[in-house]
Image (tube, rainbow, N blue to C red):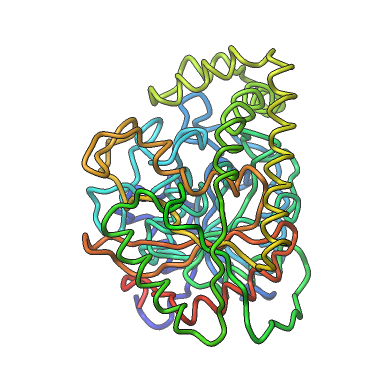
Amino acid sequence: MDQGTTAFEQALQLAKDDPLDAFISVVDSTDAPSQPPSGELDGIPYAVKDNIDTADLPTSANTPTLVGSRREHNHEVVTRLHNAGALLVGKTNLHELAFGITTGAAAHPATRNPFDPSRSPGGSSGGSGAAVGSGIVPFALATDTGGSVSIPAAWCGVYGYRPSIGRWPSDGRAAPLSKTRDAIGVIADSLELAQRVDAVVRDHYSDITPPSKFRVGVPRIDSTYLDPLADDVQERWNHAVQLLEQSETIELVEVDTTKLHELDAACGIGIVLYETARDLSAYLAALPEPVTFEQVRDQAGADDVRELLTLSWEQRENHDTYREAMKIREQLRDEWDRLFSEHGITGLLRPTTPISPTPVGDDITTTAFGQEVPTFSTVIRNTGPGSLAGQPAVTLPVGNGTAGLPVGVTIDGNRDDDDGLFALATELDTLVGVRSPLLQ
């Protein structure tokens, strides 16, 4: 690229040449702005996960039935980024309908990890993670139902931010899984950029004064968060904890997280399965060319997704079970509140995932801890409780493990205290954050 090439033009060319299948579609090169844009994100190129509606490009959600499907309007989050001067480069790949964590093949080929193309970038926002982790764009929008911002951020060596439920606008212009759990967030090449995106979306800049010392919760060594961990994740987690124990600005507080996982296991997937059939059906019916849930289910490109859609359809009338699940979710939210208030902590720190990136194709099972394990439930083990409760979360890269693959840690914040979480994450990033060597 010559020196006269803009950041947008560079990103667009990289997206067109993308060897990782991170992108599903890119804008026409004639859409390059003739005048320099102005705003808080002045000319910064970015990408959007392909289950979030954009007027300029179709929204396929990586499912065959929706290939070429277009909406007339941008999602409100996209509109706010546009108004701030950010420039859309293209739409990124995802696990079909965001219903998984590997971003495997469906209507489009599987996305690959920028550190090792034989490995998954995570999911469901794997295309956004790979697009940022490989340096094509500085940030990309993602969605999160059970960890789909945090997981690809960690596996691609970059930063992720999932807002508290309700912090960012939700206007029905995104293919949904669960009205209770879905959130749009951002994957970025720096924590500072993630904060800038948040400020633009909310039209509010925090002026919080951080404390001189943060109290940070960490799970007990025998907790589900930490037992078991793959060797490379364990090594990076131990190193991060050791650094924080030596810090004068961080006080680690051991907390009992047993009930978080118990309550998550009791209701999490049930809420999603009940709501998916209803919420996705409503989205599909509102398309300019409507389709049915049954059409999407029967034409699904991935076996795991077709099975989940079938289960969802079967459970759509289980009203009593759903109401009970929602009561249990309230207990989970109460337990999160209790942990924060009782221990006086600003965040709960834990490994983002128990294992590092899995081989491409390991969509159903993978090898971990010396045995064959289910891929989905293993990978979301640490992200589920916070996502279900609607806690905000920031994921930080903490370097490559012994296998040469990225490892991340995530800080779950107090609900609706995203500004306090950002202050803590900024301090943690200075102490343990390790930026991807691909972005240096």
Q: Which of these two is toward me, 302 or 40?
A: 302
Which residue lies at the image location 71% right of the left edge and 44% below the top edge? 73
In this view, the residue in front, 407 or 30, is 407
- Position of residue 142 relative to residue 421, above or below, is above
* Image quarter in which the N terminus is found: bottom left
Query: What x and y, as percent, mark residue 60?
Result: 52, 35
Quick check: 309 above or below 113?
above
| Left or right side of 319 for 430 | left
Vertical order, 24 against 320 (above or below): below
Horizontal placement of 216 versus 240: left or right? right
Expressed as whole percent of the image width and height from the top left, the position of residue 102 reads 38, 41
The reply to whether residue 383 is visible in this rendering is yes
Q: Quadrant of residue 403 in the image?
A: bottom left
Rendered-image quadrant of the C terminus: bottom left
Residue 163 image position (x, y, % from top left): 66, 57
Above or below: residue 63 compared with residue 427: above
**Residue 287 seen in this snapshot:** no
Residue occupying the point 43% across, 49% down? 127
Tell me the residue at 63%/83% (across/down): 213
Q: So how many labels did they put on this image?
A: 0
Residue 259 is drawn in which quadrant? top right
Residue 359 position, x and y percent, is: 25, 44
When asked about the image quadrant of residue 411, the answer is bottom right
Q: Nearer the viewer, residue 31 or 362?
A: 362
